[in-house]
């Protein structure tokens, strides 16, 4: 009987290990922050991260919600040390990662880092395969709050199994760390990753262009990534977000209209808002985009519903996002390559349930009548109209 009880206890342990859960509740709203990759690629460094953090305080981004500062690929030495630990490149990070984490925490930020579920990262640095528990303990000792975990050099590894190991390792290391899964949507993580991760990439990489394939074939313009997210809205919600990749807002390659539209539509998607531009020298206009609180509020709305594409016309798309308190956000995108007079007849928005709505033009902050009024404007190519509808009596 004793042996039987022991067996039962063992079985319970194995079962609970197999169903280990992520740290719940770390991402009630889509994470917001900044990442080194889109502008600086392999040229990340302690100096860059500190200067960026200081700029994010000075320009108001931190107070608008951008709190995760993420060091992407290429922060490491090419080899682990004799004990098998990852080592930060001393030329790029002379004071090491714990010191960088301390700096960021003292300034009210959270510290994010990148690595890879394969043997090497996409940049050719040591990946985590086979070292998951050791690496998770190291990240915890550095004060890491967010781990972006990539998918290069994974060989024949299985996505769900591999990411579950790292999720378990983070859990075992004991520090609450947001787990940002980056396997490019290959094994449809929206179908299986909710217990494992707080967010998961749904696509390959974003390029600083409106649409189409980027210079590197795994990169696409943001509109192409947006299209790939159609239909995925049912899989997202508080603590489990679809991630259509980072913002290219303010990065050379996009027009101002395209930056504004990407920002608007990423907010409609309840996407993580991870800026990737050089915030140390951005224009007041770009800063105005990234820090517009009314637009950010659409992304961060506590209902946590991802918006959906309601309608596609020849040169126009209509996107809608349900918000808390029966409010709605509606975004109209000019998909044509010329400025156009766009009209939105809100009577056609069949998802609306209330009889009367007051409408606000979100980018200008100005009242825009009611849902019974016609809404028309001249909109630049690849720019948007963005409205917030509030029930009224
Ligand atoms: C992959 C990821 C990118 C970035 C690079 C770094 O391509 O999808 O977001 O992290 O690796 O090498």
Image: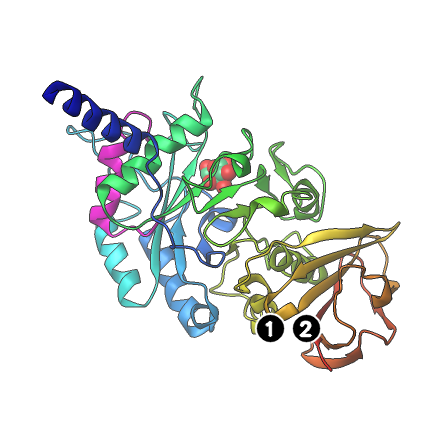
Are discs 1 and 2 less than 8 Å apart at CB? yes
| Residue at 85%, 62% in the rendered image | 348
**What residue is shown at x 32% (from left), y 53% (from top)?**
46
- The residue to which callout 2 is attached is 362
Q: Is residue 70 left or right of residue 249?
A: left
x%, y% of residue 261? 69, 59
User: In which quadrant of the rendered image does the C terminus lie?
Assistant: bottom right
In the rendered image, which quarter is residue 77 located in?
top left
* Mark 1 surroundings within 10 Å by alpha-carbon count, few (fewer than 14), some (14 through 19), many (20 or more): some
Say which of 40 and 372 sits in front. 372
Mark 1 → mark 2, Cα distance in angstroms: 6 Å
**Span shown in magenta:** 127-146
- In percent of width and height, residue 281 lies at 51, 65
184 above or below 179? Answer: above
Asked whether residue 33 is drawn in magenta, I would say: no
**Between 196 and 383, the one nearer to me in the picture:** 196
Name above or below for residue 89 compared with residue 352.
above
Please name the residue that numbered disc 1 is placed on: 294
At mark 1, the secondary structure is helix
Q: Residue at x 43, y 68 (%)?
A: 62
């Amino acid at each position: 009987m004793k042996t039987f009880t022991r067996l039962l206890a063992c079985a319970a342990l194995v079962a609970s290990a197999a169903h280990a859960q992520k740290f719940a509740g770390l991402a009630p709203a889509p994470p917001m922050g900044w990442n080194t990759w889109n502008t600086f690629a392999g040229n990340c460094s302690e100096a860059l991260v500190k200067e960026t953090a200081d700029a994010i305080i000075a320009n108001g981004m931190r107070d608008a919600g951008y709190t995760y500062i993420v060091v992407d690929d290429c922060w490491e030495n090419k080899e682990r040390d004799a004990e098998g630990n990852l080592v930060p490149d001393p030329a790029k990070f002379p004071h090491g990662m714990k010191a960088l984490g301390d700096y960021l925490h003292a300034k009210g930020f959270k510290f994010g880092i990148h690595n890879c579920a394969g043997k090497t990262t996409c940049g050719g640095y040591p990946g985590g395969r086979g070292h998951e528990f050791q690496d998770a303990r190291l990240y915890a000792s550095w004060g890491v709050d967010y781990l972006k975990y990539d998918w290069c050099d994974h060989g024949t590894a299985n996505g769900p199994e591999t990411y579950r190991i790292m999720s378990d390792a983070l859990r075992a290391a004991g520090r609450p760390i947001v787990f940002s899964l980056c396997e490019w949507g290959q094994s449809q993580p929206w179908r299986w990753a909710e217990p494992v991760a707080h967010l998961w990439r749904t696509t390959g990489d974003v390029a600083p262009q409106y649409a189409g394939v980027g210079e590197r074939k795994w990169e696409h313009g943001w509109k192409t990534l947006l299209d790939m997210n159609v239909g995925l809205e049912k899989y997202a919600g508080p603590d489990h977000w679809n991630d259509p990749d980072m913002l290219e807002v303010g990065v050379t390659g996009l027009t101002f209209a395209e930056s504004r539209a990407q920002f608007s539509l990423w907010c409609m998607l309840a996407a993580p808002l991870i800026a990737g531009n050089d915030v140390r020298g951005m224009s007041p206009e770009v800063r105005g985009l990234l820090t517009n609180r009314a637009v950010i509020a659409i992304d961060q709305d506590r209902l946590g519903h991802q918006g959906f594409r309601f309608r596609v016309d020849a040169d126009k798309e209509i996107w809608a996002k349900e918000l808390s308190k029966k409010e709605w956000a509606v975004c109209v995108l000019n998909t044509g390559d010329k400025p156009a007079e766009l009209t939105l007849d809100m009577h056609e928005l069949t998802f609306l349930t209330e009889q009367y709505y007051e409408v606000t033009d979100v980018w200008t902050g100005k009242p825009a009548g009611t849902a019974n009024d016609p809404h028309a404007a001249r909109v630049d190519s690849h720019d948007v109209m963005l409205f917030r509808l509030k029930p009224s009596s």
